[in-house]
Image (cartoon, rainbow, N blue to C red):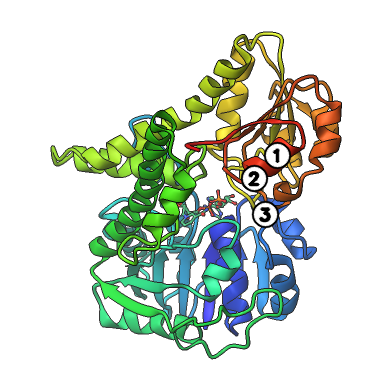
Amino acid sequence: MNTIIIGTGYVGLTTGIVLAYLGHEVTCVDKNPAIIESLKAGIPTIHEPGLKELLDEAKDKLRFSDTIPPLRGEGVVLIAVGTPTKDNGDADLRYVDAAAKEVAACIRADAKLVVVNKSTVPIGSARHVEGIIKRSLAQREVEATVWVASNPEFLAEGKAVHDSLYPDRVVIGASEPEAVNLLRELYAPLLEQTFSAPLQTPRPENYSLPSLITSSPTSAELSKYAANAFLATKISFINEFAGLAEHVGADITQVARAIGLDSRIGSKFLHAGIGWGGSCFGKDTQAIITTAGRYDYPMKIVDATIKVNRQQRLHVIERLQQQLKVLRGTTIGLLGLAFKGNTDDLRDAPALTLIAELHERGAVVRVHDPIAMDKAKEQYPELPVEYCEDPECLAIGCDALVIVTDWQDYKHLPLAEMKARMRGDLLLDARNLLSPVDVAEQGFAYVGVGR
Ligand SMILES: NC(=O)c1ccc[n+]([C@@H]2O[C@H](COP(=O)([O-])OP(=O)(O)OC[C@H]3O[C@@H](n4cnc5c(N)ncnc54)[C@H](O)[C@@H]3O)[C@@H](O)[C@H]2O)c1
């Protein structure tokens, strides 16, 4: 099917490449010409495992452009632009509005299109986008058939290709059966898993076919916010218990295992640590609270989730202060900048909070990240840190090391070499990534979260 993706960031690029791999003719549009240039040269502009290989495999079905082509005949347009937070906590729809206007201007009279909100957008956005498009068509006196649907994306960064190929479910919120049918056709290879799995992203064992959930646009829109709020709550929940575990002398990793094996609870998102970050949880929890506020409906659990998370980041600073007593004049080495492992995304990364707090308290901050350092230098040129090529270099002269990002590489740190280069001996494992016993054996004083 002829498919246009507007916005080629983490969601748009992954979705575009995956749909092309499944056999659709896909045009990925981004208004940033540097992104398009790089993609035309076969170089993905984001770090996602398996994405480059899939881009190579699907390139015959993919086109990249900084303008939307004329929209004729049957097809699907997926809007996947950013929806950042406005000052009042609401989702900022300016990019969605601009994309909808640009799409509308390219629709030709013979078009039969579903325009899809794939971006995470507030309740009512399907109707909002439909209004923009219909008004533009009326002004231009173009009589095309256009439906607008909501199709929220649930992929997780760091495993975006995997999640796109093997989703748990596909949610389509549309008022007209024609729109549902076109999208069902688009996703048929996923729903039926008729494609051969790419080598680098194999189909998980025991994977069962994903469910197709069809609903009203409003239910689909709310589903996305509910999913993110729930996942964020699960993390804040275990972090709250981690705090109590520190008081009573329990080990939160053992508690999490004990409760996670209960099938009603499940073990995912029960890892105590520095708290959640990234481009979605913060903005989406804030946006849904703002939406609910318009109905005078307080979202008490979501509100507490945000507060616990904020506190969790600062708890790392408190632990450092407890151990080192005075932070001014110390050198702290942060292992990891990205908001989580396997991604180069720095949006709302806990490392940024730590850097600001440590700098404020007079510490010298050294940082290492296996992937995200170039992005950090580009996006935050004023970041008050010393960049280090590898963990051994990071350790030089440090009073303490902090594991900030759960990169798998950090499970195999050359601890003895690092310890030998440090001034102090503290290792604060803010992700509970390492074994306290192994770390202590290398001469470190180990501090984890809730253990
Ligand atoms: N990142 C995630 O893990 C994730 C997961 C699920 C849903 N989402 C949602 O998906 C949406 C996109 O997120 P993202 O992380 O991919 O964003 P992103 O910032 O990585 O990418 C957005 C892209 O859209 C482009 N763009 C903006 N306006 C445009 C226009 N008018 N025409 C063409 N291109 C335009 C930008 O240049 C940018 O490259 C957001 O609403 C987000 O909440 C994100």
Residue 271 image point, x, y percent: 48, 48
The local secondary structure at tag 2 comes to loop
For the point 55% across and 27% down, the residue is 353
Q: Spot the residue most to the left.
A: 296
Q: Is residue 270 visible?
A: no
Q: Is the CB of the residue bearing disc 3 within 8 angstroms of ligand 1?
A: yes
The residue pinned by badge 1 equals 439
For the point 42% across and 51% down, the residue is 256
The reply to whether discs 2 and 3 touch (Cβ–Cβ < 8 Å) is no
Q: Is the CB of the residue bearing disc 1 within 8 angstroms of ligand 1?
A: no
The reply to whether discs 2 and 1 touch (Cβ–Cβ < 8 Å) is yes
Q: Indicate whether 309 appears above or below 136.
A: above
Q: CA distance from mark 2 to mark 1?
A: 7 Å
The residue pinned by badge 2 equals 434
Q: Is residue 419 visible?
A: yes
For the point 77% across and 61% down, the residue is 43
The residue pinned by badge 3 equals 46
| Kind of residue sitting beneath label 2 | Leu
Residue 283 image point, x, y percent: 41, 41
